[in-house]
Image (cartoon, rainbow, N blue to C red):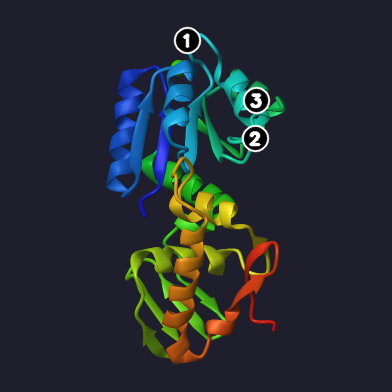
Amino acid sequence: MPAQILVVEDESAIQELIALNLEQAGQTPILAGSAEEAWTCIQTALPDLVLLDWMLPGQSGVDFARRLRAEPRTRLLPIIMLTARGEEDDKLRGLDTGADDYITKPFSTKELQARIKAVLRRRAPEITDDAIEYHGLNLDPASHRVTGKGKALEMGPTEFRLLHFFLTHPERVYSRTQLLDHVWGDHVFIEERTVDVHIRRLRAALEPARLEAFVQTVRGAGYRFSKAP
Ligand code: CA
């Protein structure tokens, strides 16, 4: 799934350049020229990451970052601040904005991608293209292949995303609501029972490799992915 990246930048030339870079890297840019516009975009759908310019008309990037950190829904949204070279760059780093990283303008495409990937790897590994191995189970997002103990395993796109999420977040219990948010996207109105249906299908898909026991029901809490019985 391509990462949706919200670009909050008032200078249209820089905004277009970033959008082009993101598209070339297979990501989907969503563009906003101010904090207010960005806020509206976020109400519609949560992006996977925000590239946030410090100097914006109206509410500054610093204040907007703090606002995102204060709201429960956007509290964990990965943020990379864009700054101008010089003193303000140092000043910003000293401020407690809650940003995950900073990039100084002008930056190269390579640097932008390296920072985005590093932040996503840390904050949202399920949307990177890194291949994952977990106790005999292998998932490769790039080729969209899953193998269990060397056997190719067939599954639908939702089961694939669910497994990708589990493999990047093993040994933790997730409620049905949390799984809906992470795997189906927030603001998606689906019944919680849908999760159970896809859990069943995922178990069935893992059966040929006898790995279905990795998908565990935790009574009253939700589901956990673990090799431990
Ligand atoms: Ca600016």
Q: Residue at x 36, y 28 (%)?
A: 31
Q: State the mark number for residue 66.
A: 3
How many other residues sit within 10 Å of disc 1, few (<14), some (14-19) or many (≥20)?
A: few
Residue 89 drawn at (x, y percent): 59, 24
Above or below, comparing residue 139 to residue 66 in the picture: below
Please, what secondary structure does the residue beneath circle 3 have? helix
Residue 106 drawn at (x, y percent): 42, 29
Amino acid carrying mark 2 in the image: Pro
> How many labels, in total?
3
Residue 192 drawn at (x, y percent): 52, 55
Q: Name the residue under label 1.
A: 57
Residue 105 in sight here: no
Q: Nearer the viewer, mark 1 or mark 3?
A: 3
Above or below, comparing residue 163 to residue 35 in the picture: below
How many other residues sit within 10 Å of disc 3, few (<14), some (14-19) or many (≥20)?
A: some
The quadrant of the rendering that contains the C terminus is bottom right
Q: Looking at this view, is 3 or 94 the one in front?
A: 3
146 left or right, relative to 166: left
Q: Mark 2 points at which residue?
A: 72
Dot 2 or dot 1, earlier in sequence: 1
Amino acid carrying mark 3 in the image: Arg
Q: Which residue is drawn at 63% across and 57% down?
A: 175
Residue 218 in sight here: yes
